[in-house]
Amino acid sequence: MTHTDAPAPAVALVTGASRGLGAVIARRLAAEGHPVAVVYRSGAEAARAVVGEIRAAGGTAEAFAADVTDEAAVTALVADVAARLGPVTTLVVNATGPQPERDPAAVTWQDHLDQLTFFVKSPTLLMQAVLPAMRERGGGRIVQIGSDVLERVLPEMSAYTAAKAAQHSLTECWARALGPDGITVNTVAPGWIPVERHAGASSAALADYAAAVPLRRMGEPGDVAAAVAYLVSPAAAFVTGERIRVNGGHALG
């Protein structure tokens, strides 16, 4: 293959990318050569800042505002990204919403629906929207950002935990269904990785958590981004249907 025949780098769409894990993942994928769609629901200034950082480092990125829980918005988003950056063949499902803590006796069906909207409905809409381009190009990568909360069994997080379990079930089903199309589907399941929304966490809480981690430290957003970068790389071409915990061994039995 000559230099001029080399395939164009895969366009990566990262949801919830204006801050937190999503922003770090977007910057890492851009550094790996992917044109990146920085998708956000709110926080336009923060999204533009992420794009600016990527461009300053020599990468390619555009910011896209969208409600990724809305079917029409997702369809329009993927078409807009294709028009501005190229067809999406790498999808990182990272967007999340509020994660209220509730005693199981007080959890409502709406609490469950709120979590399922982010972790079942939205991923499904996104997968279906990018699937035609992935199939047309003979393959793609889908990575969902899950959680190690499944192993931690926190009663006050029952609605969130149930939705995260369902999300990984989607990963496994999609991996089997889309494998023949050359599409891999995996989940990265972080432990507690402090980001902006954890700014109010006490130093004592952080220290207690880190003490329970076999590696004796808190995880960093870059640890999660590194796992995502691996899964969307050629090195992970034969890895699909997996759930990779990035938590320093915290959930080990």
Image (spheres, rainbow, N blue to C red):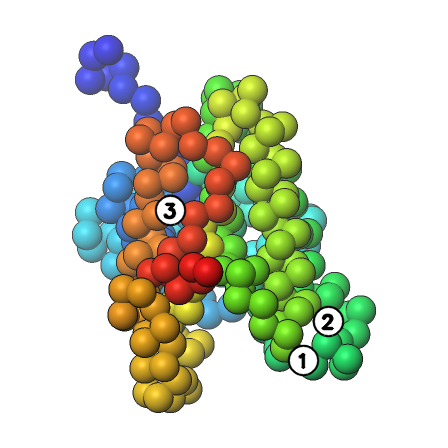
**Amino acid tagged 1:** Arg
**Amino acid tagged 2:** Asp
Tell me the quarter of the image containing the N terminus.
top left
Q: Secondary structure under badge 1?
A: loop
Which residue sits at x=42%, y=53%? 245
Disc tally is 3
Judged by depth in the image, the label closer to the viewer, 3 or 1, is 1
Residue 231 seen in the figure: yes
- Residue 236 rendering spot, x and y as whole percentages: 36, 32
**Label located before the other in sequence (1 or 2):** 1
> Are the residues at dot 3 and dot 2 in contact (C-beta closer than 8 Å)?
no
Which residue sits at x=46%, y=55%? 189
Q: Is residue 35 above or below residue 94?
A: above
Q: Which residue is mark 2?
A: 111
Judged by depth in the image, the label closer to the viewer, 1 or 2, is 1
- Quarter of the image where one finds residue 70: bottom right
Q: Which residue is mark 3?
A: 228
Residue 46 seen in the figure: no
Q: Secondary structure under badge 2?
A: helix
In the displayed structure, does residue 180 sit left or right of residue 45?
right
